[in-house]
Amino acid sequence: QIVLQTVSQGSLDASKDLQKEFATIEKKKEELADYLCEDRKKLSLEDVFNTMKTFRELFLKALQ
């Protein structure tokens, strides 16, 4: 029973830590949306990363 309590507490702690990380990521995403003059609710991190990837590829191609 002690092992189960320890595992349960560890899971709860990990869950709380994960929630904090997600909240931090969401806040940073909103700051990025503001910086890029984008709608906070519509900005997708996937779109941002894809745009950065495309820019990088085109930039490297231009250097060649």
Image: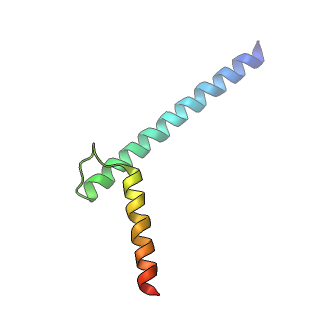
Q: Is residue 18 above or below residue 37?
A: above
Residue 39 left/right relative to 59? left
Residue 4, position in %: x, y?
Answer: 73, 17
The structure residue drawn at horizontal position 44% and vertical position 65%, both measured from the top left corner, is 53
Q: Quadrant of residue 12?
A: top right
Q: Nearer the viewer, residue 46 or 25?
A: 46
Q: In the image, 48: left or right of 17?
A: left
Question: Which color mode does the image show?
Answer: rainbow
Judge by depth and name the residue closer to the eye, 55 or 1: 55
Compared to 21, does 34 lie above or below? below
Q: Percent from the top left, x then y, of residue 39?
A: 23, 48
Occupied quadrant, residue 41 = top left
The answer to whether residue 9 is above or below residue 59 is above
Q: Position of residue 43 (x, y in %)?
A: 31, 49
Q: Residue furthest top?
A: 1
Please state the total of marks drawn on the protein image: 0
**Horizontal placement of 18 versus 11: left or right?**
left
Q: Position of residue 17 (x, y in %)?
A: 54, 35
Instruction: Name the image quarter holding the N terminus.
Output: top right
Q: Residue at x 64, y 23 (%)?
A: 9
Q: Residue at x 39, y 70 (%)?
A: 55
**Which residue shows up at 39% across the image and 51% down it?**
45
